[in-house]
Image (cartoon, rainbow, N blue to C red):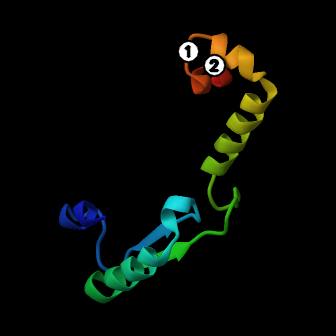
C-alpha cells in the first residue's frame, strides 16, 4: 500500500476496496484503516465475505473449487502437473 501511495496510484479521496479474505482482516487492519484515512484521506470499503455480485473473482474461485473437488486426489497427485492447471483444463 505504501508503494501505491508513493507512486501516486492511490490518491487522497480514493476508496480502497478489500474483501474479507483472511489476509485482509485482523487487528492490524483497523490500524491500517485509521492510518490511511488520517494521513492520506483514503477510505477502505470492506466487501462482504463471498459476495460475487461485488467481487467477480469469487466466481472464478468458486468454479476452480468445484472443478478441483470433482477430481479425485489420487488423480491430481499422479497428473504430473499442478492442480490448478489440471483443474482449469
Q: Nearer the viewer, residue 39 or 27?
A: 27
List x then y, in percent, for residue 32: 37, 77
User: Relative to 46, is 75 on the left or the right?
Assistant: right
Indicate the quadrant containing the N terminus: top left, top right, bottom left or bottom right.
bottom left
Q: Where is residue 10 in the image (x, y as percent from the top left)?
A: 31, 67
Q: Residue 81, which numbered label? A: 1
Instruction: Return the mark for residue 86.
Output: 2
Residue depicted at 72% across the width and 30% down the height: 68
In the rendered view of the protein, which quadrant contains the C terminus? top right
Q: Looking at the image, tell me whether mark 1 or mark 2 is earlier in sequence order.
A: 1
Which secondary structure, mark 1?
A: loop
- Residue 79, percent across and down? 63, 11
Q: Which residue is drawn at 71% across and 38% down?
A: 65
Left or right: 45, with 47 as reference point: left
Query: Can residue 42 be seen?
Result: no
How far is the residue under mark 1 from the one under mark 2?
7 Å
Question: In the rendering, which numbered label is found on residue 12?
Answer: none
Quarter assignment of residue 82:
top right
Q: Residues within 10 Å of mark 2 (few under 14, many from 20)?
A: some
46 in relation to 31, above or below: above
- Check if mark 1's residue and mark 2's residue have beta carbons within 8 Å: yes
Q: Position of residue 53 (x, y in %)?
A: 70, 59
SS category of the residue bearing label 2: helix
In which quarter of the view is residue 21 placed?
bottom right
Amino acid at each position: 500500500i505504501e508503494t501505491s501511495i508513493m507512486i501516486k496510484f492511490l490518491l487522497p479521496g480514493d476508496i480502497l476496496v478489500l474483501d474479507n479474505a483472511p489476509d485482509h482482516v485482523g487487528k492490524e487492519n483497523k490500524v491500517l484503516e485509521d492510518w490511511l484515512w488520517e494521513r492520506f484521506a483514503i477510505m477502505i470499503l470492506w466487501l462482504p465475505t463471498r459476495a460475487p455480485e461485488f467481487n467477480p473473482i469469487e466466481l472464478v474461485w468458486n468454479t476452480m473449487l468445484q472443478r478441483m473437488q470433482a477430481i479425485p486426489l489420487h488423480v491430481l497427485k499422479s497428473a504430473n502437473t499442478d492442480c490448478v492447471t489440471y483443474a482449469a483444463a
